[in-house]
Image (tube, rainbow, N blue to C red):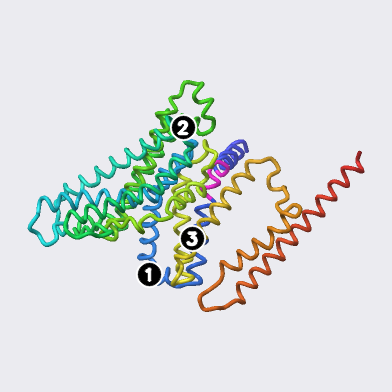
Amino acid sequence: MKSDSTSSSLVGQFVSRHLTEIVLLAGCVVVFGLTAIVNDAYVLRFQYNAAQIVRYASMLGIFAIGAAIVIISGGIDLSSGSMIAFGGMICCMVISVVAHAIYPEADDPTASIPNWLIVVGVLCTLLAGILVGTLHTWLITIVGLPPFVATLASLVGLRSLALISTEAVTAWLGQQSFKINIQDRTFGILGREWWIPLLIFLVIAGLAWILMNKTVVGRHLYAMGGNEQAAKLSGIRTERLKWLAYCIGTMTAAIAGILFSSEVGSSDPQTQGVGYELFAIAAAVVGGCSLQGGVGRITGVILGALFLRVVIDAVAKLIGSGSSDYEGLIVGLLVVLAVAFNQLSGQKGGWKKQFFPGMLGVVTIPIIAAAVGASLLMPDGGVVLPLTAAATTLVVLAILKVGADVASRAKVSSGGHSK
């Protein structure tokens, strides 16, 4: 009996500790299964679709892990998307410039390049990531800018710098363009073969897990995220930790930039990585990271990236053409739900609070109903589904508000009578 109770206790502790990962894993299975029932694409082309999900989830997970470490350390990095574009540009620029110098007479010097040149391009990209991370740290620790402002400047500036550099370099090479094309087959394989991003993702995830769970530096990152002032007073060198966190964030985004550029055979700062900073933050938050810092696990971020990709792919299968228009809506909704869940779970009696109090609640309910209806608008002009969804949402939320108001008045009344 004692052995059974001990085993039950251990299982309960495991479930409690890894509840986020269990829910995300179950969510992936449920979403995948329901999509397979409604749409036979997963059944007819299971291997292809599974490989695509794994490939894109791995590419998302690579820079989501970097963003998660920044968040756990108490910061925020809004530059991931632009760093992806900048990193891809640096890699393609180095390869293209050196290839033109080596093969000046070739019609397309990048059509066949030595492997060492790809390695040089990758190393230069990683160096660029370290330099941008160092700049972020300087702006935050020395200049005193909030992390939001410092990385917001990079969000805007890095993409513009990548565009300017691309135009200048392509003009020097003889044909001005907004893209730098790399036609080498080996370079293209990096982002097109599903197992290469997966392997890189697993290596980065493994190293990040060791760093955060098995080293003193990882414990100090958690401590700094939980209470930076207390960490300083205990002798922790917070400036060095911030430098490490922000460099990891920018380096992982730069690696993702190489893969995205490899996938299409070119760097395109105008389109690559646009909005991906939200994807990185979403994967981290859905995976259990708290935006207040000090909370989060690498395993949760891994499954958060997978869940995000499965949901996006499921919507693409169900909607078909135009599904990319819904990606921002899905990611934004998941971020709101994940943050709200973390906040309410961390508050005593959080789930019992009244969500639509007073006039603010009266105004908010129709806004939410209208947003739900608008999100279901289709190009074919059908309005029955959007109107039905909006009306249903309005009625359900109104009932919840009335019920909460009645319960609140009853509680106040009973409290008055007891006195």
Residue located 20% across and 45% down the image = 120
Q: Amino acid at mark 1?
A: Arg
Residue tagged by mark 2? 144
Q: Is residue 159 above or below residue 387?
A: above
Front position in the image: 285 or 307 = 285
Q: Secondary structure at mark 2?
A: loop
Q: Main secondary structure of the magenta part?
A: helix
Q: Secondary structure at mark 1?
A: loop
Front position in the image: 168 or 283 = 168
Whether 109 is among the magenta residues is: no
Q: Real-space Cα distance between discs 2 and 1? A: 53 Å
State yes or no: discs 3 and 2 in contact (Cβ < 8 Å).
Answer: no
Which segment did they paint magenta? 15-22
| Residue 45 disc label | 1
Q: Position of residue 156 (x, y in %)?
A: 40, 49
Q: Amino acid at mark 2?
A: Gly
Q: Amino acid at mark 3?
A: Val
Mark 3 closeness class: few <14, some 14–19, many ≥20 residues within 10 Å: many
Front position in the image: 154 or 13 = 154
Q: Position of residue 289 (x, y in %)?
A: 51, 43
Residue tagged by mark 3? 311
